Image: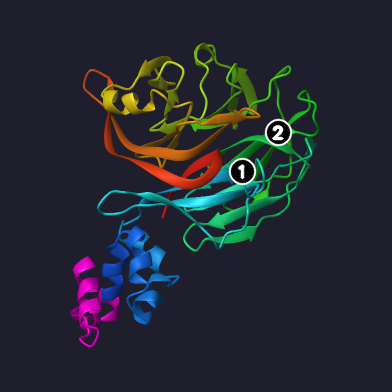
Amino acid sequence: MSSLIRAKKENPSEPPSLITLPEDVIFDIIARVSRCDYATLSVVSKHFRSLVTSPELYPRRSLLGCNEQCLYAVLYNKKTHDDRLYMLRRKTNGNHCLVLIPSLPAMPSNGKYVAVGSKIYVFGKIYEHYNINMTLSAVSIDCKTHMVQPLPSMPIHLIARAAVFMDGKIYVTGYRDNNSKKVMMVVFNTETQTWEKENIKLGMNLGNTWPSYAVAMGDQMYVTDCQNTFVYEPKESIWDDDDMLNLVKWKDACVVDDVLYYHDYVENKFRMYDPVERCWGVVNGLEELLAKTRLSRWAETVSDGVKLALFFGRVKSCLYGKGITDQIWCAEILVERDQEGEVWGKVEWCDQFMIPGKFYLTKFLGVMI
């Protein structure tokens, strides 16, 4: 496809041979092209632009099994004082880069983000002059078109603290006010695009904890404040604690094949937790990558269910507990278990992104498109 584009530029009067093919064949060829090349294809001709922007393109990609993982980053710009969404643009020669999506508005400050399929759901939370304002705001972003769709308002005013997708539903946990003893959970059904009628009160006394991270493993949800981990069983509406998970202060984790992974930047180890074996371990084979993360003060893992990506950065300074950085690294890792049960990681690529300005790192997400 790249040689075809070069031929078009060098001989604009000579139509590419691809144009002579039947329309369905052309469409199938473009559907098989990596999404990162669509921006280049769209400037070749009006015909290609219409095919790239066709609403039938992504269903065809899905039918052909050409879906691919796309990574997004939510960054807070210290200069403009807003959260904006960036997309990781992959290049065939490496040198991947984070690109601002200008068509999308600023995101809710300190919002909670959940990736579901090809969509990103955002549940807003706004801080203003150090006073916490609760919100009913909820929107979804279609990553195929980068269009924002308002969702029905949350059934109660909530200070969202954690959100996780599980079995077709998004569970949003938070507080009715600034009192951590009034913990509530609301549930959004992604299939019907509606909120469940009943608000679920947490069945455990969480004390003064402020749960900030959540993952789904199997048919259970795990919520932590980096000190204590609580487990929720949706079918029985039962909360419990997990002594094994409490042994490690995990955060910014992701799940691949029902195994939890996260980077422990304090000890600079890539840790894993198997809920079936109920044991902690480390991922082997990542010595070169860990040499790069040794000076990192933050790291976050993201998954599409098959691979995981580790985002990390060199923090220049801190403000209100957040790291300010102008450089972000990303490594894509394939994890596999050998015959002895040991988990090994293979780094498929690792790149550094230089972004002008100073940023707080808000959230990283993986979607399938």
Q: In this view, does 43 lie to the left or right of 288?
A: right
Q: Earlier in the sequence, mark 2 or mark 1?
A: 1
Q: Which colour scheme is used?
A: rainbow
Task: Name the main secondary structure of what is drawn in magenta.
Answer: helix
Image quadrant assignment for residue 330: top left
Callout 2–callout 1 Cβ contact below 8 Å: no
Query: Per the image, is 10 magenta?
Result: yes
216 in magenta: no
Name the spot of residue 232 as percent of width and height, x first.
60, 26
The residue where tag 1 is placed is 78
How crowded pointer 2 is (Cα within 10 Å; few <14, some 14-19, many 20+) is rated as many
* Quarter of the rendering occupied by the C terminus: bottom left
Magenta range: 1-25
Q: In screen coordinates, is 344 left or right of 277?
A: left
Residue 149 visible to an observer of this rendering: yes
Q: Give the residue type at disc 2.
A: Gly
- Quarter of the view holding residue 54: bottom left
Q: Which residue is drawn at 21% across and 84% down?
A: 20
Residue beneath the point at 26% across and 24% down? 285
Q: Which of marks 2 and 1 is in front?
A: 1
Residue 174: which numbered mark, if any?
2
Q: Is residue 193 visible in the rendered structure shown here?
A: no
Q: Which residue is drawn at 54% across and 11% down?
A: 243
Q: Report the Cα–Cα distance between label 2 and label 1.
A: 26 Å
